[in-house]
């Protein structure tokens, strides 16, 4: 029995030690479960360093310089020539050749004394009538005393008669006034002449009385003739020889080379000179009408020739899309005898 209490005491001591050990182990386990990770700073993504742009340097202003075209320069030169002349000037140009066919009018709508320019539509009417069969070149037309007017020929008298061809040659190449008056009368008078003129583009003209026209009107008539609109090629072949190499070549032809063919009609009266026609060469063709008023006759023709030369300088340098002129055979000299 002595050993009983001692064993009991030993067991108690062991139990106490085991309990202490268990308590220590639990505390250690608890401590390991409650330990938290150390906090860490949030790492921001790397940032790209953006440097501010330097202030923009303003671009220098762009200056566009538009050089005048050759056609614009032509217009400017013609305006200058007209202004410096001291005259009242009208110019009307229509190109009939080249890839781009321009027209130009410098005072071309102004009214001028027509003088013998009324013979332009008069002879075009004759050509159209002959081409259409309404008249013949061999028709006989007789003089009436009311037709008399100073002119190139003086063989008109009571009972004298002439063929239409001869009267047309006299009125065209020689600008004879009496021959033209006979033709106007047989056409139907001044009303018929004005009606025909308006039908071919001369809408601002009043011919015969008071006998006025404009360069633009004359150009319109010549364009119609040149493009075969007034009776076709037959009319042109009859008309053009009458108005080529006329007795007055002081105007438009004087500013052109001999290689150019000029079919034209002049007029001059009381300080007014005018010339209009169709110009054609190997490389160009155009219609030109010029009127000058307020200077003496010599200066007037000289100015027309200078304007013609400046226009030729421009036109001869253009591409050669040409409307060819009809053949212009040499017409026979006028017969001075009476028929």
Image (cartoon, rainbow, N blue to C red):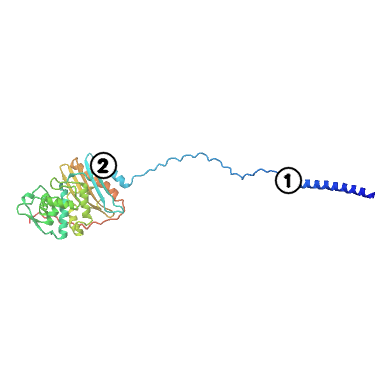
**Which disc is residue 48 wearing?**
none
The 10 Å Cα crowd at callout 1, few under 14, some 14 to 19, many 20 or more, is few
Question: Counting other residues with Cα less than 10 Å from the Cα at mark 2, is it few (<14), some (14-19), or many (20 or more)?
Answer: some
The one of 99 and 153 positioned closer to us in this rendering: 99
Q: Secondary structure at mark 1?
A: helix
Of labels 2 and 1, earlier in sequence is 1
Vertical order, 4 against 138 (above or below) = above
Label 2's element? Answer: helix
Q: Are marks 2 and 1 in contact (CB under 8 Å)?
A: no
Instruction: Indicate left or right for 300 with 41 as reference.
Output: left
Give the numbered dot on residue 81: 2
Q: Position of residue 246 (x, y in %)?
A: 18, 51
Q: Horizontal and vertical percent for residue 131?
A: 17, 59
Which numbered marker is on residue 34? 1
CA–CA distance in space, label 2 to label 1: 112 Å
Residue 176: image location, x then y, percent = 12, 50
Q: Residue at x 22, y 51 (%)?
A: 220
Between 214 and 29, the residue placed more toward the observer is 29
């Amino acid at each position: 029995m002595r050993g009983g209490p001692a064993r009991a005491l030993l067991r108690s001591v062991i139990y106490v030690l085991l309990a202490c050990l268990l308590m220590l182990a639990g505390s250690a386990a608890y401590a390991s479960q409650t330990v938290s990770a150390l906090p860490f700073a949030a790492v921001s993504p790397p940032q790209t360093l953006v440097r501010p742009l330097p202030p923009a340097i303003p671009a220098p202003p762009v200056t566009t310089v538009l050089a005048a075209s050759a056609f614009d320069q032509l217009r400017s030169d013609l305006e200058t020539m007209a202004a410096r002349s001291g005259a009242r000037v009208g110019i009307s140009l229509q190109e009939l050749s080249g890839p781009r066919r321009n027209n130009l009018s410098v005072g071309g709508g102004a009214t001028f004394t027509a003088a013998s320019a009324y013979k332009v539509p008069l002879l075009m009417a004759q050509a159209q009538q002959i081409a259409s069969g309404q008249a013949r070149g061999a028709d006989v037309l007789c003089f009436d005393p009311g037709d008399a007017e100073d002119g190139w020929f003086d063989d008109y008298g009571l009972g004298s008669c002439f063929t239409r061809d001869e009267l047309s040659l006299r009125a065209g190449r020689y600008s004879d006034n009496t021959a033209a008056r006979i033709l106007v009368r047989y056409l139907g008078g001044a009303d018929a002449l004005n009606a025909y003129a308006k039908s071919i583009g001369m809408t601002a003209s009043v011919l015969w009385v008071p006998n006025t026209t404009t360069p633009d009107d004359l150009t319109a008539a010549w364009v119609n003739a040149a493009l075969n609109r007034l009776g076709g090629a037959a009319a042109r072949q009859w008309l053009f020889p009458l108005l080529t190499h006329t007795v007055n070549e002081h105007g438009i032809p004087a500013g052109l080379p001999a290689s150019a063919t000029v079919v034209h009609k002049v007029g001059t009266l009381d300080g007014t000179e005018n010339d209009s026609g169709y110009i054609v060469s190997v490389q160009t063709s155009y219609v030109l009408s010029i009127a000058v008023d307020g200077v003496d006759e010599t200066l007037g023709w000289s100015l027309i020739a200078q304007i013609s030369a400046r226009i030729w300088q421009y036109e001869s340098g253009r591409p050669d899309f040409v409307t060819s002129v009809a053949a212009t055979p040499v017409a026979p000299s006028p017969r001075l005898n009476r028929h």
